[in-house]
Amino acid sequence: MSALRSNYIKTFADDISHLYYVFFKRYPVFKLFISKILFHSSGNFGLSIIEDNKIIGNYTIYTTNEGNIVKEGLDSKVSVRFKVQKSIFDDVLANKSLYASKPYKLLKFVPSLFSSVKITKKYPEGDYLKGNKVILRQGCEKDLFYLHNWYNDEELNKLAGWTEGKLGTTQLRMNLLKGFGYDPMNLIIETIDEGKPIGTIQLYDFNEMDQSCKLGIRIGDRDYWGKGYGKDAIKTLLRYAFYELDIFRVSLKLYEYNERASKCYLKCGFKYEGRTRKSAFIDGTFYDEILMGALKSEFIREFGKD
């Protein structure tokens, strides 16, 4: 058990967030000195409190749409970690008003900031994400065979709401090239035990201002339906979006006839947000579109670091 209560750490994190805003609004040029931290940060930070050369508490601070959420322990997915002397911790808590009115006084903390920060690689090794049942990886040439089948399957296309014709090799190959770091971010879902590609999953329509994006998934191999592979893939990608990217909200849409997908999304932390009546014309029939969303704050509270 950490020596400091999480509510004190949250107060400290909230105070630092406010002072950070005040300082860099007054002195924006100093952002150049922390550009590396900003690049690798996802808005989540590891924090260790030090006293008498001993760590008396480890915490992870998640910045969300509802403010900072503090969890005890260090999350391995967090790229930026700080070690803070308890004397600085106490100083900030006691003198927040002074620093807010005279932000230049915060300059005395700059040396300790740079000496205490540890940055790990932002993107996963080998460009893949590992869940419990699947890995999500960059596509390659050998996947074209599977994609041809999955994206030219009438039943799968109807579940996705597609009304377009078949996709050719050129378009599928272009999709394969867009993996980590792209919009859309297209990934192959592969089983861990067998190493078999079974579908695709995407994050797309990234909005930097709103800190949001959308999610799509297609389990193309019917032998893996209803066995938890889709759920594991979705939760794995949501963890990446919320813990390692600067994303606060992930949304999706589906159609009224896709009840199986709806149940899966609910188990992954999505909530119903709306329904547009008879707004999708698919195969000669009008259907309702169902809108769902997952928030970083809710996901962290529900699933934590599992």
Image (cartoon, helix red, strand yellow):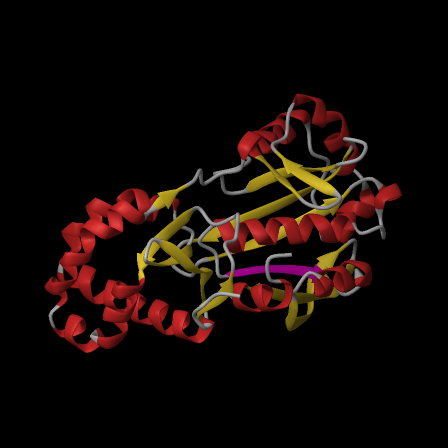
Q: Main secondary structure of the magenta part?
A: strand
User: Residue at the location (80% across, 52% down)?
Assistant: 228
Residue at x 65%, y 60% (from the top left corner): 253
Residues shaded magenta: 249-254
**Quick check: 306 above or below 125?**
below
Question: Can residue 251 be found in the magenta stretch?
Answer: yes
Relative depth, front residue between 206 and 72: 72
* Residue 129 on image: x %, y %: 61, 40
Place of residue 61 in the rendered image (x, y in percent of width and height, measured from the top left): 44, 62
Residue 133 is one of the magenta-drawn residues: no
Nearer to me, 178 or 269 = 269
Q: Along the line of sight, which residue is nearer the eye, 298 or 45? A: 45
Left or right, 1 with respect to 133, comes to left
Whole-percent x and y of residue 198? 77, 38
- Is residue 287 left or right of 204 when viewed as pictured? right
Q: In this picture, is 160 found above or below 298?
A: above
Give the total of numbered labels.
0
Quadrant where the image shows the C terminus? bottom right
Asked where in the image residue 67 lies, by quadrant, the reply is bottom left
The structure residue drawn at horizontal position 53% and vertical position 66%, both measured from the top left corner, is 1
Residue 163 visible, this orientation: no
